[in-house]
Each structure stands twice: as C-alpha cells, then as structure tokens.
Amino acid sequence: MHSTSSPRLPLTGVRVVEFCSTAAGPFCAMLLADMGADVVKVEPPAGDGLRQWPPLNNGYSENFASLNRNKKSVLLDLKVPQDCALARRLILDADIVVENNRPGVMDRLGLGYANFRDEKPQLLYCSISAYGQSGPRAEEGGFDLTIQASAGVMSVTGESDGAPVKCGVPISDFASGLYGAFAIAAALADVRTGGRGAHIDIPMFGCTLAIAALQTSEYFGTGNSPRKLGSAHPRNAPYQAFKAADGYFAIAAGNHKLWIEVCRVLDMPHLAEDARFTTPTLRAANQKALQVLLESSLVQQPVEHWIAAFRAAGVPHARINDYAAALADPQTVHMNWVQPLTLPGGETTRTFGSPIRMDGQGFAVRDAPPALGQHTQEIRARYAPAAETM
C-alpha cells in the first residue's frame, strides 16, 4: 500500500486567503492546501452555502467536508468596516487570494486586485467566475449546470435520441478549480524567481470549452458540431458500453491490433475482413451495425466472463462501476486514496484524498474541515490590532 505521509509539502509556507463558496473556488484552494499551503477560508455569517448540502452528519455537511480539508475558517461580515479591514490585512499578509464571486463584488468591498496591485506587487489574485472578468457576459452568474449547457457539454452528452442531460460529475466546477490551481502554481514559480504577481482570470465557460479540445477541433475541421453518441466514440469503434447477459461493461479497442483481438475473443474473425469495419473511421461510421453484431455474441455470457476474456487478451475493458464499487476497487485500496476524516463534533467519516503521488508518497489529510468560524478568534488575535489602526 502506498504511503500518504508526505515528508515534504511543496507549498509549505505559502499563505492563501479564500473568499469562495460551493465548488470551483473551494476545490482550487483545497488543491493548494493539500500541497501544504496555509489556507484561511473567509466565510460570511451564514457560512459557505455548501455547508447546508446533504448528506448531513450530525448537522455537518459531508459535501462541504470533501472540499474544505486542511483549511482554517474565519467568519467575517465584509459589510462591517472592522471585518473588511481585517480581510484586507489577511490579503496583505498572503501570497495568494482565491475568490469566486461575480466580477465587481470584491472591488465594491475594496478588496479587489486593483486595491493591492501597487501595495503588494507580488500578490497572486485568482478570480474564478462564470464567464470571466470582462466581456458581454462578465456580469452573468452561473453554476455548473448552466455552464455545461452554454459551453456545449450537454449537446454531446446522452443518447442520440434522448433529452439533453448534463455530465453526472460537475466537470465545469472542477475543471475550473484545476485550471485555477495550475495557473497559481505556474505564476508562483515566476514570483519566486523575482517576477511580479498577477490577476488570474479563470472563466468557467472558457475552461469548459478548453477541456472539450476534441469536440472543438472536430467542429473546426469539419464545420459540423459534434453530436450525442451515448457512450460511443466519434472516431473509433468498438469503444463504448456493450450489453452482456446480465448487464453492461465497456470495451475500448483503441487501435487496429486491439480490434483484431476483439474479433478473436468473440470468435468472429470474419468481422475483421468486413468492408464496413476495416479501419477505425469506417468502424466509427458503422458502429450501430457493429454494436448489433458484437452484442449478438456478448449477450450469451455474463459480464464477469467477458471481463476475464478481454483481460487475458489485453483489450482495455471495465465494469460499469457505481461509486461504491469504484471506491472499493483494489487499485483504490492499494493507493490508500480513501482516508478517515473527523468532522467537527467528533464524528468520523471517510473522504477521497489527493490522488497525486510524489516519489511514491501521497498527501495525507493533515487537518479536518473546519467548523464555521472555528479559527476566527485565533485570526482576530493575530491581525485585529493591526487592522484596527488602518
């Protein structure tokens, strides 16, 4: 089993102030916290709205816990001058700010990037928003669903004859958080060698379009928008979920050699010579007919039979796991990704930790997710006297 006792955390000593709620911003800041950054999460009196999301464990949200480990929570009412002054002091003492409010909100509070650019030129200030800090849609709000809709994801998700559906995982939120953390880490390397800070603009709309590189390039190359294909692939086959006797499983025959192996495993060598299936492009163009032919054999045996057969043949394959099965997968267990987590109040739950390994070692959960305002007095004691004189 891989160790999660990180002896050296690459962002140790880096100070982050987070003004975020729900998913994209908190995830971005948590990625920095996992790497050792000291993250202070500034919350309004009502707290991050994610604290109210079920499942609740003795009143504490497990959803919130999954995105806010290794952080401190400070409760500040930014409409109160003294609290706003304390927030300003926190920022001046930080290396990084992460915020995911609508553009203009932080400026109106006197906490926007322009308020610190000259006084703290090395500050990295990351703003995550629905559409970006400028442009005709900058003032619009957005959540993962609406960004998936506007950025095209829902147009390619689901069965070809079905209603629009979103991806079951909030990819717009989490892709944006990943882009934010990556940009911060890259800019931090520049700052550490003498470069200036920057205002990092992370638009969820743009990030969601960016991770659709295969879909946008298909449009640029053909002039046609990609279409919904269910689990199938637009340029290769067999590369989708197939029906067996007792359920479904996935095959990804991503090259011609693997296609020949599929024919061999199914004892259907004639398909390799069929003019409809001799190249990946032809197989993709005729994949409905190919699916019917393959499933005529696949439905004769249960999923476990085919899992063993395709494993022996070296053809990439997978069960259609639910999350209970995926979290119990032997690889998950081996990598020690599921870790215990103590919630405020003492209840113990589990969480999925950082999947990253450096030199074979993972990143442990160092601190439990905080109760609302848990560290307010600590931070006030450290900064309030200075804030009050500003």
Image: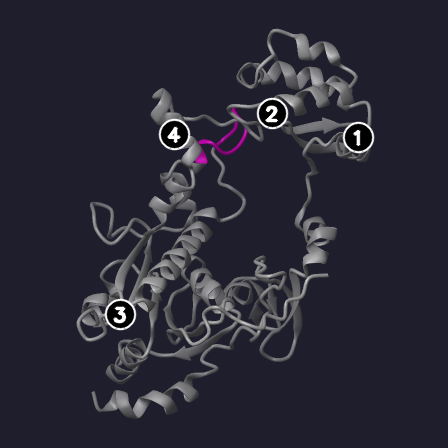
Q: Which residues are magenta?
A: 154-163
Q: Nearer the viewer, mark 3 or mark 4?
A: 3
Earlier residue among tags 1 and 2: 2
Q: Nearer the viewer, mark 1 or mark 2?
A: 2
User: Amino acid type of disc 1?
Assistant: Ala
Earlier residue among tags 1 and 4: 4
Secondary structure under the numbered disc 2 in the rendered image: loop
Residue 275: percent from left, percent from top: 61, 6
Query: In the figure, is residue 142 to the left or right of 165?
Result: left
**Few, some or many C-alpha atoms within 10 Å of disc 4 (few <14, some 14-19, many ≥20)?**
few
Residue 156 part of the magenta-drawn span: yes
Measuring 33% from the left and 75% from the top, which residue is drawn there?
94
Q: Which mark is residue 217?
A: 4
Q: Are marks 2 and 4 in contact (CB under 8 Å)?
A: no
Q: Which residue is mark 2?
A: 255
Q: Nearer the viewer, residue 201 or 270?
A: 270
Earlier residue among tags 3 and 2: 3
**Few, some or many C-alpha atoms within 10 Å of disc 3 (few <14, some 14-19, many ≥20)?**
many
Marks 3 and 2, how far apart in space?
Answer: 49 Å
Q: Nearer the viewer, residue 11 or 385?
A: 11
What quarter of the picture does the C terminus occupy?
A: bottom left
User: Amino acid type of disc 3?
Assistant: Gln
Q: Nearer the viewer, mark 3 or mark 1?
A: 3
Marks 2 and 4, how far apart in space?
Answer: 21 Å
